[in-house]
Image (cartoon, rainbow, N blue to C red):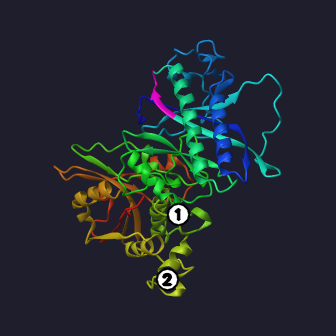
Amino acid sequence: MAPSDSNVIFRVRGSLEFSCWLESSNVLQSQRSISKSFNDLRSKVREESLVFNICNSPVFLWPNQDCQATVGNVSASTPCGDLQKHIEVEDWNGGGKKKRKDKKNVLTVISLTLMTEVTVPAEENLPAPYLSTEKKRHALNMVLPVDCVISTAADESIGIVCERLIGALCCQLSDMEKVVLQHMKGTAMPVPQLFHFMLPEPNGLVSVVYPANISDSQLESYRKELHKKYELAEDRPYFRRANAFQFPDQPYKDGYLRNPHEYLNHPNLEGANLYLVQGVYSYHHYMQDRINDNGWGCAYRSLQTICSWFQQQGFVERAVPTHKEIQQALVDAGDKPAAFVGSCQWIGSIEVQVVLDQLLNVTSKIMFVSQGSELATKGRELANHFETEGTPVMIGGGVLAHTILGVAWSESSGQIRYLILDPHYTGGEDLQTITEKGWCGWKGPDFWDQQAYYNLCLPQRPKMI
């Protein structure tokens, strides 16, 4: 089911102890032992001792005991959306923090922890993965992480939700079993990894198990099977690890803001349609990464935002290039002399095109505009770009560079607004300041210097999975 505004995503995470015997001289027997162990785990998640704890709440549920709960007014017939009443939300007004800015159409996620009720004291620490040897037989013991999600209507009963979660856990264990058996080499058992991907409607959020330590490039045939299963075109990645869905309660660890435009209200422009960047990008701007590029690095930062888009959509695996790496790429391409590396010299749209080709093997189209007043007539071209390619656009004019993330354009009247991400921002990663002060915001045609010429770099999306 695809999530909607009235839906709730339930996510249950935990670990299960996995153990089996592997025989180096009998691969078939080892496979049978693995299958038996996974079958035992599927039985375990259906036992009455299984418990769900609603994170940040006092609510514990016994899903296999008719959803008995530790809170009196929670039962199997309670609408699952009511569980939000029992969840404590962090106070963003306290401790000097500013009030959190709400994302438009944010998903409601209720997190649960998988637990087991015990009647004897548990071991202080869960066992680390280990392998003990007994002649030709090996005992494998490891902690197997589980991470299941379902999307459901907020008025669905808790009883039905628990049934679906138990079913999802069993399905995930079956998927793990298939991956382990398929990628085993002798008695070497691959560790299964869990990923969730948000697909276009009507598919919504789906879960996939991959073997750890096997690269995306080696899993292309499996991804093709997934594209066919979910009826997806094979012109863009949906199932690379970089495409994994980032849940709202899991902040990114690299410190960059993602998609600040999603916190903005749309412009009120009669008869206009929205044409926006597709996917996730990082906001790169002046003074980040301990580099003082104030006054010369705006095009570098716009290029970094574009590179982050290609990385986070799974088109490339390389990290976002630094200023020096961008400069070295221009030298390697024969566009600049060796002395350019380490300088504070500007670059423009043409250099951005060269670097994207040199580092990412991404081609770009260049749109030339002789004066800023002509940009108001480019609505159709920009709308088509965002509808078909969906990549951020770098625009340079005079000594300034910006990133265009979309347009609101009326075909009948020709009126247009531009969604601008401004790399000239020099402050910290303060979403409220960035959105309220217009560093990421909708701009009219008068935003551009009406007399200056502009070049726009429109990166083209590679056709790949």
User: Judging from the image, what secondary structure is the residue with disc 2 in?
Assistant: helix
Q: Which mark is in front, 2 or 1?
A: 1
Q: Position of residue 187 (x, y in %)?
A: 70, 53
Residue 439, visible in the rendered structure: no
Q: Nearer the viewer, residue 327 or 290?
A: 327
The magenta stretch is 150-155
* Image-quadrant location for residue 368: bottom left
Q: Which amino acid does the dot numbered 1 rest on?
A: Glu
* Image-quadrant location for residue 19: top right
User: Judging from the image, what secondary structure is the residue with disc 1 in?
Assistant: loop
Q: Is residue 431 magenta?
A: no
Q: Position of residue 446 (x, y in %)?
A: 29, 58
Judge whether 411 appears above or below 299 on screen.
above
Query: Which residue is tagged 1?
Result: 317
* Image-quadrant location for residue 249: top right
Mark 2 to mark 1 CA distance (whole Å):
20 Å
Mark on residue 332?
2
Q: Position of residue 135 (x, y in %)?
A: 83, 52
